[in-house]
Structures are given as structure tokens and as C-alpha cells.
Image (cartoon, coloured by chain):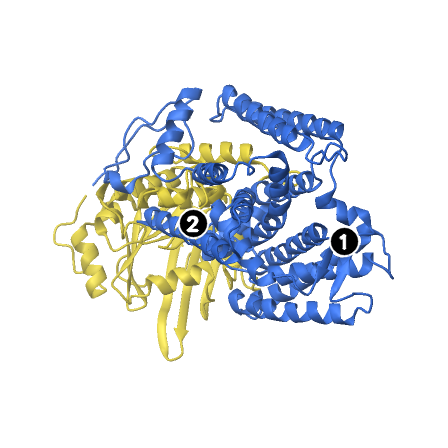
Chain colours: A yellow, B blue
Amino acid sequence: MAADTGAGARSSDRAPVTTSTAADPAGTPLLRLSKVGKSFGPVQALTDIDLDIYPGEVVALVGDNGAGKSTLIKTISGIWAPDAGQEFWEGRPVTIRHPRDSAALGIATMYQDLALSDNLDIVQNMFLGRELMRGPLLDETSMELAARKTLADLSVTTVRSIRQPVGSLSGGQRQAVAVARAVLEKAKLVIMDEPTAALGVSQTAMVLNLVTSLKQQGVAVLLISHNLNDVFAVADRITALYLGRVAGTVRVADTDTQQAVQLITTGALAPVSHPSA
Amino acid sequence: MSTTSEASDIQPDGPPVHPDEGMPSAERPAVSNELVTGSLLDYSKAFAKRARSGESGTLPVLVGLVIIVIIFQTQNGKFLSHGNLVNLIDQAGIFVTLGMAEVFVLLLGEIDLSVGYVAGVGAVVTAELAAPPHNVNWFLSCLAGLGVCAVIGAVQGLLITRLKLPSFVVTLGGLLGFEGVLLYLIQQDKHATGGVISVTIPSVLNDIVNGSLSVAAGWIGLIAVVVVFGVYSLLQNQRRRSSGLVTPPLSLVVLKILVVAVAGVVLLLICNANRGSALVKLQGVPWIVPLLLAVLTVYSVLLGRMKFGRYLYAIGGNAEAARRAGVSLNNIRLFAFVLCSFTAGLGGIVYLSTQDSISSGIDGGNYVLYAVAAAVIGGTSLFGGRGKIVHALLGGVIIAAIYNGMGLLGLSAAAQFMVTALVLIAAVTVDAVSRRGRTA
């Protein structure tokens, strides 16, 4: 952990990057990025990224291809360390250099391939790497009970049996298993990378339900998506990246799809013609 | 777009109510792998469905075995005689043991081609120590043989996991290299006459396959096994039921216990009949049977009920997922190769006991093929992630049955090889086709 000043000293003087400043929820953000930058040789992939995520909040990260979304989530999840700026977790300055570091803080990252073992059943996948034991033996009964409860809390109803192999599940159900895994890990922040990219309409609805369930349980979600319908359905705030910078952060309640598209494509907001209530 | 709201409780019991949200039905499994409802009738119905959709477990293997038995019995009435069946059990010992060794690495999607000659080296080390002039205690000799094999497994495993060499090539080297080691060790032994180290004198080694339990000991052992199995199954069932989990009906558990008891009684009746002559009585369960059952039980617990086994399946299914879950891939893989070679050492001791001796004539190359064949015929996948220890038992018995039956019919080695090869290819085809069915 880096020796740095506390978060409190900086929280008030954060300069807005763009003209649009969203009114942040009150309290200490779960994760705060301050002036985070990352470059690969001469390529400056991320510049001065400011981002706050509060507990139980869904923040959508949008932006065109190459805007830096993937670089940013990989920085947060510790695939690589940022080379500028500071990260704060629950107000404390932290250094995330390795996926282990982010996992220890309570950040669960779900990549598109989900990383599930098709030959293992739902319970086995959910507990892989953190099995409950009863002496030297696996405690299947306790794991099955906990898995059932977790899925029920997430309102996952379409799974026939939690002892069926994950390979037999649909795309949305696989997402549900991955999310339930994150919940079991007691993750405080779940990063979802394009969770609906390969899904049909009903499966997408199921995943969005999961996001809502996570939010209701007080888990923060950072949702990367190209689909603005999905974003507007579940997100509280939208942060748009443009060429490696934060183009703007807007509250979903205060904006519309047109504005969001504008942010994504031009990196700036034109004056709003008819301010909404 | 609003999020849909569905019934918010998972159905703990009772059949699923609504079909999966709008998926084409072809994508969905025909039936869930675990039963949701309670009665024995429902279970048998679901089992029939599962069998039709290719998830039938060991049933086709058992059907295959019955067909093979019927064919040989109609060709030669001696096939099902007491003496021949016990002989078949003795012959199956080596195939079953080497097949169990192979299951560990096949689960990873790897292969070990060296098990035949690793078994040979283990047998030579054991025999060297147990035979004159050393005359070491049989138990210590076996430990030494098994220890050497475990070290061999560790060396091959380290090459495969740390240097990332393909297991196929490393163990192909082992196949050749350990035949060399075997020849060298036998050449160095001045007491080995004509390249044969005999172990007829330390009688325990000889008795593993050739000795038998007394009739009474057989019955006592059977009763003990049935009681332990029964109590364990009932306790297990009770624990699930009291936790409110989906539980198989009690009648199914009782049925399973009964099947085990009946199978045990049949086995004992076969083994306890006099298979010698009127003058020299020869009866009782060969020691190899309780030995193999003990190894089978320990390995099944290791694979099915312990972390190591869970991680082995996880790596075989999706190594990247296991890595991200924090599983130490290298350590698990290494241990699998150590266990494989260790079990091959057990096979070597079984071979030593069958032959009363070990010679440079052991055909380790053939035994590897039979070992892989036993595991795959029994139902273990060559592609990793799917398989059980019991598959080696079933496959090993099938190979022994073919081997034994064709011997009875007086068919040549040429015919035996060809038939075994056909059975192996058929088993791999079933594996590959069912795998395609699953991923499609």
C-alpha cells in the first residue's frame, strides 16, 4: 500500500474533467480513481481518469472501440498497475498491482468468457477454489445449501437443478452462475465486461435482473456495455470514455440516449435544447 | 426496456414449472442430471430418459460386458465355470490397476504412455529386494518398489508441468527409457537366471493373486463391506434429507445396498466353490479382489470427495477457469502424474504376483495400450474432465474377458490384438461422438 495522504483531503477539490458534473451520491465512494493514467510505450491509453463508484450503485462505462474501457477495467482488476494517479478503496489509498490484490479488496471481474468449467455442476463451479470442507472431505451438503440460497437471493429461477453441469446451461444462466460466484466471494464491486454481448432478448433481461439484484444487495457494479438500452435499464450513472479520457459522467435520470451517444461519439456534450426535469 | 420480474423463489422440490426463457429446445438438456422429485418410479423414468440422451453412465459398459459373456459362453461352455471366472479375475488385476493409473492423467486431458514399463521397474525393484540374496521383508520391498515409481512419476511430472513439455512425448520417452532401465537392472542381478527374478519364496507376494482368503473370511469380509456401505449410504441420505436438499428416495438407497449385497454373494459363491480337484481343494476369494476394492475405494474418495479430485476435474474441464479460481495447476498436475506412476507400481506388484517372477519379457508396450483401453472402454474421456476410477474396473474386466474368452477358444494372439483394438476404437468413437453431442 502506498504511503499517501488520506482521501479526505482531496475529496472536495476534485476538478471536473468535462462540463458535465453529475451530482455524486453522498458518502465515501467504494472505489475512487483520481487522475489515473496508463501508457504502453508511446501510447497514452488512459489519461487523468477520475471515477467514483458508490456501494450499491451501478455505473455504466461506455465509449467507442479504443476509448480505453478494457484498459481501465484491467487497471482496476489488477492485470496491470496504473503509472499515474491514485486509487482509493473505501477512502483508503490502495495499490492494485495483481489480480490477487483486487480480489483481496472485494473486486470480482467477470470477463466475457466467464471462466466456468463445463464439466462441473453449478455448485462445484460456484465454490471452485474455496470449497467448504468437513474434515478432509468436501462438504457437499453445506455447499449445495449455500449455492441454493445465493441463487434464490439473486432471483435466479430458471435453473432446473443446481447439480446439472454448467455446460448444459444457457448463456444467461452461465452469467447467473458467474454472478453468484462473485456474491459468494462477498465481492463489494463486480465488474462485468459486456455481459449481454452474445445474448438474446430474454437472456439479456435475465442478466439485467442479476445486475439489479446485486445492487439491491448493496454490491456495486461497473458495467461495460455497448448497448445503451441495457445501460439505461439498470445503470445509475454513466461514465463515457473518449480517447482515453473521461468525456463525462452523467446521471441516467438526467439524460437520454441521444446525449449519451453524443458523449460517446464526440467526447463532449452539446447544450441541451430542452432541459428535462 | 424494463427488467422482467419472475417468481422470485427457486423451486426446491417439484418438477420445473416454466420452460427456460424462450430458448430453442434443442439447446437445452433433455433432462436435468439430478432428479427433482422423489419416488423410485420417477427416478427410473428419468434414468431411462437420461440413457436415451446419452448420459447413461456405466449402463452401456455393463450391457457390453453381458454381450461379451454371452458370446463366449455360447462358444465355450467352460467360460462361466467357477475356475475360469476366478482365473478371469486374476487376469483382470493388472489391466484394472494400470487402467486406474491412467484415469488420473486422462482426467487432465493428458496421457501416460510409460505405465507399462514403470510397472516393470517397480516390479523389478520389489523382486530384487524380496528375493535372495537380500530377502527383505515383503512389505518393505513393496514400499521401495512403489516409492521408486512415485519418484519416476515426479520426474516425468516435473518435466511436463515446469518445462511445459507435452506429456505424450515425455512418457513416450519413459516407455523406451524405462524398458532400458528394466533390462539393465535384470542384467545386473547375478542371481537372476535367464533374465528372470523369481519371488516364489516370499509367499505373500506370490499370494496376492495366487492365494485366497478362507471361505469364512470371505463371508465375514462381505458382511463388513455391506454393513459399512449400507450405514454410510443411509447416513448420507439422512443428512441431505434433514438439510432440506433434493434427496433420492430411501427405496433407491435400499435397492443399491441390496444390489451390492447380491453381487457380493454371487462373487463369493463363485470363488468359494472348489475349483481344484477332489483331492486338492482350491477355494476362496483371491486376495487381489479385496486389494483392488480397497484401492478403488480410496481413489474414488480422493477423486469424488476431496479437493484434489475436484481440481483435477476442473483443470480437465477448463484449465483457465481453474487457474482464475486460484487452483495451483502445476501442483495438481504434478500430483496426478505421481499418483499415476505410483498406481502403475501397484500394477507391477500385481504382475509380479501373477507370474511369480519378473523378467525382461514383460510387454510394457502392450500393457500401456490395455491400460488406456480399460479406462476409455469403461467410460473415461480421452479429452479430459470426464471419468471415474470405477471405469478402469469395468474396462479392465471387459479386456480380461476378451483376452480370457479368446484364449479359451484357442484363437491366436493376432486375433486377440485385432479384437481388442476394435473394442478400443469403438469406445473412443463413442467418447468423441458423445462429446460432440454435448458441445453442440
Q: Residue at x 23, y 61 (%)?
A: A264
Element type at mark 2 = helix
Which quadrant: the C terminus of chain A?
A: top left
- Residue B212 shown left or right of residue B433 in the figure: right
Q: Amino acid at mark 2?
A: Ala
Between A63 and B87, the residue placed more toward the observer is B87
Q: Is residue B202 visible?
A: yes
Q: Amino acid at mark 1?
A: Cys
Between B165 and A146, the residue placed more toward the observer is B165
Element type at mark 1 = helix
Q: Residue at x 29, y 44 (%)?
A: A234
Q: Is residue B365 above or below residue B143?
A: below
Question: x, y percentage for residue A114?
Answer: 39, 52
Separation of disc 1 and disc 2 at Cα? 34 Å
- Residue B436 shown left or right of residue A64 in the figure: right
Q: Chain of mark 2?
A: B
Which label sits on residue B142?
Answer: 1
Question: x, y percentage for residue B190?
Answer: 82, 69
Residue sitting farthest toward the bottom: A42
Q: Which residue is mark 2?
A: B427
